[in-house]
Image (spheres, helix red, strand yellow):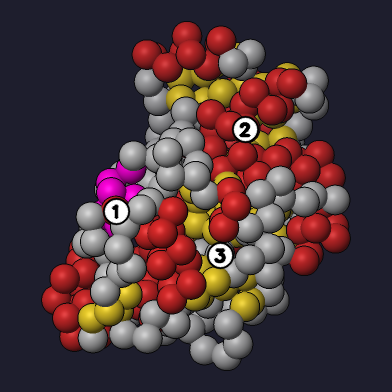
Amino acid sequence: MRVLVAGATGAMGRQLVPRLTGAGHEVFAMTRNESSKARLSELGAVPIVADALDRGQAEAAVLEANPDVIVHQLTAIGHVDTRHFDRSFAATDRLRIEGTDNLLAAGRVAGVRRFVAQSNGAFTYARTGGPVKTEEDPLDPSPIRQMAPMIAAIGHLERAVLGADWTEGIVLRYGAFYGPGTSMEPGSEQLEMIRKGRFPVVGEGGGVWSFIHIADAAEATVAAIENGACGVYNIVDDDPAPVTEWLPELARKLGAKKPMRVPRFVGRLAAGEAGVVLMTELRGASNAKAKRELGWRPAHPSWRQGLHVS
């Protein structure tokens, strides 16, 4: 198939492009930067320089590639400051709203038959009910102020993709990434904070996290491109875990002391309200549907074995 990957130079794109070319697909890699063309060519893709926030450029890129499938992996997430969560995700929110609309409009003109888009299943589910959610469960209907723009952007993306009746719209709700190129790769700032004892458990630490190795997420994405049906899939590992489990275990792997516990009000002062929500109220996600319908299994079934710190 001819596949256009938008966001080809990000952590996911760098894993996805070589897997697609290795599987025999003709891959077109969309990037904003001329400087990325050589690297994308080395991965076996045809680079196309375009800004997804410019509708004309997006349409020209899609028409040039003439793809069977568009894969929307556009993000702009750098350092996440949980005290200013909305600011940290502002650029990505724009890509998930304007970028999604532009790619869909271009895809409709080009007659794209499948549209696969990155969503988030790590931080977006409603913070009520049981600890593990399925694709049938709603996104958080009443998020805190700092997280509301991010969840609204995710909601826009999902409605737009699933509502595009001229194509097969597929939404992949990825868990929290770890592995090469992510915020939890060896030597990352986040792991160093844990190593130095600067990442405490807040409150009861009952927030449930679902992780996924970036390579497993890329494999699931290939499966969705090749075999997915219209709908939503949680792309997470088999082991959703509360903060009280994963944070001490990660500290142990790093050779650090067991993380201290602080009350919610102290966590709020240090990490903001979003930081408290991430530590105390998150819900995890089930991967049963992706396993059943995509024929996919994570090679790293648990973060306990997959998350390497050195």
Q: Which of marks 1 and 3 is in front?
A: 1
- Whether 264 is among the magenta residues is no
Q: Earlier in the sequence, mark 1 or mark 3?
A: 1
**Earlier sequence position, callout 2 versus callout 1:** 2
Residue at 60 percent across and 87 percent down: it is 130
Query: Which quadrant holds residue 271?
Result: bottom left
- Residue hosting label 2: 16
From the viewer's side, name the closer residue of 93 and 132: 132
Q: Distance between the residues labelled 1 and 3?
A: 21 Å
Q: Which amino acid does label 1 sit on?
A: Arg
Check if residue 193 falls in the magenta segment.
yes
Residue 171, image x and y in percent?
A: 65, 56
> Which residue position holds label 1?
195
Does residue 102 lie above or below 164 as drawn?
A: above
Report which residue position mark 3 lands on.
210
**Which mark, by number, is residue 274?**
none
Magenta span: helix, strand or loop, mainly? helix
Marks 3 & 2, CB-CB < 8 Å contact: no
Part of the protein shown in magenta: 188-194
Q: Which of 92 and 302 is in front in this view?
A: 302
Residue 2 rendering spot, x and y as whole percentages: 74, 25
Side (left or right) of 119 relative to 151: right
Q: Position of residue 283 (x, y in %)?
A: 53, 77
Instruction: Specify the amino acid type for callout 2.
Output: Leu
**Mark 3 → mark 2, Cα distance in angstroms:** 21 Å
Query: How many residues crowd around disc 1 within 10 Å: few (fewer than 14), some, or many (20 or more)?
Result: many
**Number of numbered callouts drawn:** 3
Q: Are marks 1 and 3 in contact (CB under 8 Å)?
A: no
Rendered residue at 37%/86% (across/down): 204
Amino acid type of the residue tagged 3 in the rendering = Ser
